[in-house]
Amino acid sequence: REQGSRLERLQSKRATNSAGIRMAFVGSFRACYRPFVPAQVSEVSDVAALNVLKRTRRVHVQVPGNGGDPAVGISYAEFGQTHSGAPTIVLIHGFDSSLVEYRRLAPLLDDFRVLLIDLHGWGFTEKPRGIDYGPESKRLYAISTIQKLLGEGKKVYIGGASLGGGAALDLAHARPDLFKGIILIDAQAYLEGSPGSTLIWPLDVLGIQILKAKFLRRFANVQSYYDSEKFATEDAMLVGRLPCHTDGWFEANLDFLKSDGYRNKSKVKEISQKAIIIWGRQDKILSVDSVELFKEDLGERLLSYHILEECGHMPHLEKPDETADLIRKFVMTIEGNEQPSSAVDEYVSQLDA
């Protein structure tokens, strides 16, 4: 009996120590991230994604003249020349995504100041209930965020991928005084509206619930890449799904789903800025044929367009080095100071090592 009692005490002590070690590890791990980053980040192993999340902060902004909506915490991360006079590039993520989408591209653009922001209601932003999350509200909060972080009167380059490209077009059209060049990566402009604007209860609610489902996220990942075996991993799915665990995610997405969505078709012809288009040849989500529509509507404002071979809907994730080099040349051409950079080669060497 005495031996049994001693063994039980020893096992209990070991279990307590083990639990303490686990709690200390989790606590130390969580300390690397701001409290608004969901605890499920512990399931992610993608080093580039974790690097962005460690840099992610929030700034509280309020839309000028709109006293009805509160100050909202908008998440952002910065890379590159954050304290210099280098040209600034602001990058916008796609539908129900987050700034982590640019985890492979942003470190390559270290010639510039790179600002990644989450759109109002998406990513790791604060999502109060009962306020508007439609396109106009997203635009107003994005402009307020950019101006608060970069200062009034600073002209920057705006870029986006997929629906983020549509958001970038919307921003550039609304504020030509703020944005001096547009970077469009497999950008959505010619599909207008929101597919859920006509849905009635409970179909709208069901649509949002399905949006969170792992099986749908896996399918979307496979559709997004040319080399899905390499890039459409379980880890990539977990990264993309992280915002689903944020408070208010369901209500914010439902509000956008019920909105009229982005309508940019006519705006493409009206924007005044120079633009670059980057597209994956094997895009299964937005056909490469869209490039011809952009060429026709942009005319001489289209400084260059580039179709990447063996690449799907996500050039910034599947071909980040080529994408970075094209963006660099575009910006430096407008700045009147085109010159080669070693940033891509250095970053690729680090990955290979």
Image (cartoon, rainbow, N blue to C red):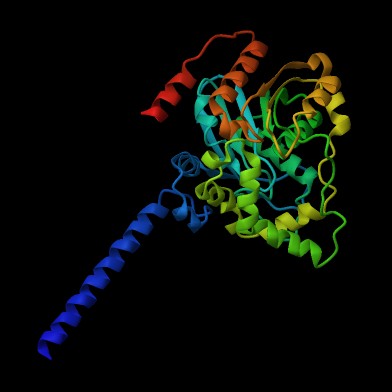
- Which one is nearer the viewer's eye here, 29 or 97? 97
Q: Is residue 256 above or below residue 330?
A: below
Instruction: Spot the residue most to the left.
Output: 2
The image quarter in which residue 193 lies: top right
Where's the N terminus, which quadrant?
A: bottom left
Query: Where in the figure is residue 128, as x and y percent of width and height?
Result: 68, 58
User: Looking at the image, is 229 positioned above or below residue 327?
Assistant: below
Question: Residue at position x 57%, y 28% from top?
Answer: 319
Name the image quarter holding the C terminus: top left
Please give the name of the residue rendered at 64% of the width and 24% of the height, measured from the top-left corner: 308
Give 150 or 27, whichever is nearer the viewer: 27
Vertical side of 315 occupied by 276: above or below: above
Which quadrant of the figure has residue 252?
bottom right
Image quarter of residue 10:
bottom left
Instruction: Judge from the rendering whether residue 49 lies leftward or rightward of residue 270; answer left or right.
Output: left
Q: Percent position (x, y) of residue 27?
A: 37, 58
Which one is in front, 155 or 272?
A: 272
